[in-house]
Structure formats: C-alpha cells, structure tokens
Image: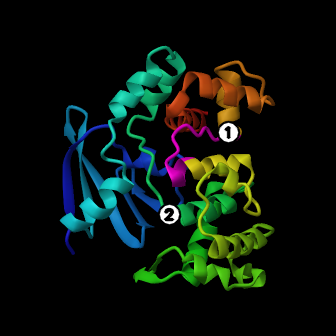
Amino acid sequence: MSSYEVENLRDFNLQHIFECGQCFRWNKISDSKFEGVALGKSVTMETFETGTGKVTLRITPCTKEDFENIWYNYLDLGRDYGEIKKKLSENDEILMKAAEYGCGIRILNQDLWETIISFIISQNNNIPRIKGCIEKFCELFGEKVSEGKFAFPGIEDIARLKTEDLEEVRLGYRAKYITATAKYIAERGLPQNEDELLNLMGVGPKVANCITLFGMAKYDSFPIDVWVKRVMNELYGIPLSDVKEMKKYAEKNFGNLGGFAQQYLFYYMREQK
C-alpha cells in the first residue's frame, strides 16, 4: 500500500484539525494519527515532528497525484496560517492565547453536500452520537470504498428515499429534514449562499453559518454555538443571550477572518474547560 509524505509543514496539527468541530468522519488512533473517509477516499494520516515547529505528514494510501489533486486543497495547505494568527492576535490577547492553544488548526475544504447533511444531523446532538449517525448513514446508503469504510451517499441516493427508510440511522426528527433537503437539492441544485441555505428544511442561522464556513469557504462566517457563546460572554463580556452583539463584535473585530477566529476560540473554550 503506497504512502505519500509531505515534509516541513508548519501550523499543522491533526488532532486540532479533526477535533475542532468542523468534521465528523475522522477517528483518532493517537494524537498524531487519524483514519477517516473524505471525498470518496479512505485514508490514514499521521504526522511526525521534525523539530523547529515543523512536521512531516504521511497519508496512506496516497499517490503524488492524489495528494496534489485531493489532499493539498482539502487540508488547506496553500494558506499561511502563521499570517492569519498574527493578524488576529495583533490587538487581542484572548485570541493570541486561543491561537497558541489551537496552533495547527486548519479549516478543511469539505464537500458541500456532505457538510449540509452533517450539520443538519449535528443540531441538538453530541459529537459521539453525530459521528455514529453519520457512519450508519454512510454504511446503509454509501458506496463501499474499503473494508468497513463507506463513502458519503450522493444527493440522488438520498433524494429517492422515504423518511422511514432512515429509521435505522436513528436520526429522530432530523430524518425528515434529510429527505426533504435531498429532494430540494436534487430539483434545484446546491445552495450558493446563506440565504439559499435557509430555504432548506431544518437549517437555521447557526447551522447555515457552519455550512458557509466549512462547506463554502466563506471565511467571514462566525458560527455561534454554546461554546462560542461562553467564550464571548466569559472572555469578551458580551451578555450570553445577545447573539446579535456577538455577531456585530466578530464582524467589526475579526472581519473576513471571522471563521478562523471562531475555530480558535471554540477549540480553546471547549478543551480548556
């Protein structure tokens, strides 16, 4: 089985990337090794420290072509996260600490359809259960890509299902959102912005913000969940119930880097607490 290695990566930490709430199909083998399925591929990723803040990344199985055509973009390796951290930390000691703590987070370039369905499943749910539901969903309706591993089902695969067909996935009230969304997208195409996302059954502002950030690469998005509410309240002094003020603060102070700020703050508050 062939592997591909990338040397001298900075600002790259698999644990921080895969455990910061942006994706649900990567499973931890160790702090520096994860296995998962993304973009129809089942792979293992592992990093090795090489000193001076750099790591070597090994992807298995992977060819040079796979890396260049799939994983380079998926892992957002063309972006200078050192510069992002510098800009966010210039006048914000809280973000400086959060960015140091979450050093190595990168925002993945994920498939939009998968991101939509994953974050509909995620609402009012905990991460272990979200991951379990998504794996069952893929096992039942996705294409097998390796032993025990299944790709995310396509739009048409789900659009032809009835809500009761999803009973085994144990999605509860979310099942009707999934089938309705699949049928809507099959007829009209994938949404292109937040307003179009809000037309989907089961997608409110918070879920839409997650999708625009993680599935559309709209980096001014600032999703506000319970952890972000806590950090904005406890560390920035904004009332817990004032989501509008939190949004306004993020727009003014983080601007088009809001999504990166959100990831650092979310991970910092959740892991520190």
Height in image: 150 above or below 194?
A: below
Upstream in sequence: badge 1 or badge 2: 2
Residue 132 in magenta? no
Report the front residue among 156 and 207.
156
Q: Secondary structure at mark 2?
A: loop
Q: Quadrant for residue 68, please give it.
A: bottom left
- Tell me how the rendering is colored: rainbow
Q: Secondary structure at mark 1?
A: loop
Residue 223 in magenta? yes
Q: What's the residue type where badge 2 is placed?
A: Arg
Residue 92 at x, y percent in the picture: 51, 17
Quarter occupied by the N terminus: bottom left
Which residue sits at x=55%, y=77%? 153
Which residue sits at x=40%, y=34%? 103
Give the labeled residue for mark 1. Answer: 224
Q: On residue 25, which mark appears? A: 2
Quarter occupied by the C terminus: top right
Residue 142 at x, y percent in the picture: 53, 81
The answer to whether residue 225 is left or right of residue 14 is right
Report the front residue among 112 and 86.
112
Which residue sits at x=19%, y=57%? 5
Q: What's the residue type where badge 1 is placed?
A: Ile
| Magenta part of the chain | 213-225
Can the viewer see residue 11?
Answer: yes
